[in-house]
Image: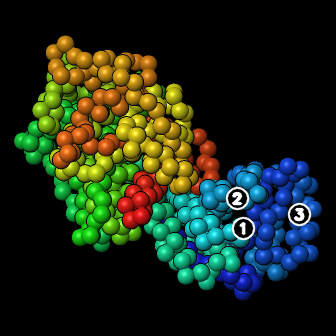
Amino acid sequence: MVKNTEIKLSVIARDVKKSPTDALVIGVAQGPDGPVLLDNPLTAKSAEAIAESLKVLGLTGAADQVHRLPGLPEAGAAVLVLAGVGKPGAGGRLTEEALRRAAGSAIRQLAGLTTVTLALPTASPADVAAIAEGAAMGSYSFTEHRSEANGRKEPVKNVVIFTDFAADKDLQPLLNRSALIGKAVNATRSLVNQPPSHLFPESFADAAKELSKGLPVKVTVWDEKRLEKEGFGGIMGVGKGSTRQPRLVKVEYAPSKASAKIALVGKGITFDTGGISIKPALGMGDMKSDMAGAAVVLNTVLAIAGLGLPVKATAWLCIAENMPSGAAQRPADVLTMFGGKTVEVLNTDAEGRLVMADGIVAASQEYPDAIIDVATLTGAQLIALGNRTAGVMGSDSVTGPLKAAADRAGELVWPMPLPEELRASIDSEVADLANIGERHGGMMTAAVFLREFVGKGKDGEQIPWAHIDIAGPSFNNGSPYGYTPKQGTGCTVRTLVAYVEDVLAASAS
């Protein structure tokens, strides 16, 4: 089901002419007095001529600006490409994210070429890795349901990075990581982009098995009979309105020398009509992406396994299709969740928190060091933080490191509070909890609801937990930018992998 774009990454240190390529990409920055040509492998004479022509060509150095020129003999390429990198930081240095975006944007816009050489300035092996990661994500394409190309260009297949660090012994592991991260992000995008005719609970579970092949992970699937028998009332309540019955999928990576234990819970609503509380027709097609959280946690664990990190990482994919029918749950129904708590369903379109609650309880029973849940949970997230920034809420011991990991990975995440007064708004007259509460600050109210299901650790204290709402940044309805395509973005995979790496680094110090 998931046909990933594969890209080959390599590096060279000298004489680009000896490495034939379709295009050579060099950088242009936004300087205080106009565009500035960045360090590159061209001769001094050629570089000076191009630098003097930047304004005439209409270049500003802005991010996503890509301009093609005829190739030069010394470049060994048919095309010379000037790629904007935006404004440099302090001291004129480019951040890793600026390099990542510039590389991704260039590779995305150069689709149709086979081999591209990226000669952006690198001050460290980490800069090279950022360029490679951006290139891997920028090469993404989703065409598996097209009967013909219709003018669409094939993505770039080979990327060569020109850098003085080509012979550095620390570089190859970093490049391997970049390729693996790119693969995980692109697999997440492809799952999100699948139409609901093809991706539904059972096929999603099958896709998890398929993607796990060759990796040291164990995949366990609960079908509707086992879910009913074991009391997963949230997942069953949401999923029973569809003829395509729900699933819970556990993907476990448990290396023998694990020094940490992390649980990831993902919302996997393969299509969300809103159920009986049906959504407006306008924009409902985007609800194929309501399973992005489950796709994120699945591919995060697979990336962790591929990297061989010494952490026990478990993904819980809470998968259902929310449909209106004679069998669907109704407003005012009461569900008994996994673990025994009861919830009055006041709105069947607040279904994500119901399936997630079951998954959080199941994750808690294994006493992880931390639980992180990821979900396209609320429209309120978009109102609060817009289309590109995810909201993170929960225990300070988890949200702080998550924000730091997101900053390092180049993703936009912002911590939000969980005001205590919101808890009273989810009281119910007939059950332990209601599934909706205070309308204003709805993103935080949803998180307060989820917090009720986080279990206690062996020390008797609530397990450290964070909730990430990716309703906006998981799906791009606007124009492509940087390494981000239209539709599924694959956001948060990089943040979660970086978080795990940071946890391991902290425990080793």
Q: Are marks 1 and 2 in contact (CB under 8 Å)?
A: yes
- Give SS at disc 2: loop
Q: Residue furthest top?
A: 429
Q: How many angstroms separate mark 2 from mark 3 (CA)? A: 19 Å
Residue 222 seen in render: yes
Q: Residue at x 87, y 51 (%)?
A: 34
Q: How many angstroms separate mark 3 from mark 1 (CA)? A: 16 Å
Going by the numbered disc 3, the residue's amino acid type is Ala
Tell me the number on the disc at residue 94: 2
Question: Crowding near pointer 3: few (<14 within 10 Å), some, many (20+)?
Answer: some
Q: Is 72 left or right of 95, judged from the image as shown?
A: right
Going by the numbered disc 1, the residue's amino acid type is Pro
Residue 144 seen in render: no
**Residue in the foreground of this view, choosing between 335 and 462:** 462
Is residue 328 shown above or below 165? above
Q: How many angstroms separate mark 1 from mark 2 (CA)? A: 8 Å
- Give SS at disc 3: helix
Mark nearest the camera among 3 and 1 is: 1
Mark nearest the camera among 2 and 3 is: 2
Q: Are marks 3 and 1 in contact (CB under 8 Å)?
A: no
Provide residue 233's location: percent of width, then percent of height.
15, 34
Q: Going from the N terminus, do you reach mark 3 or mark 1 first?
A: 3
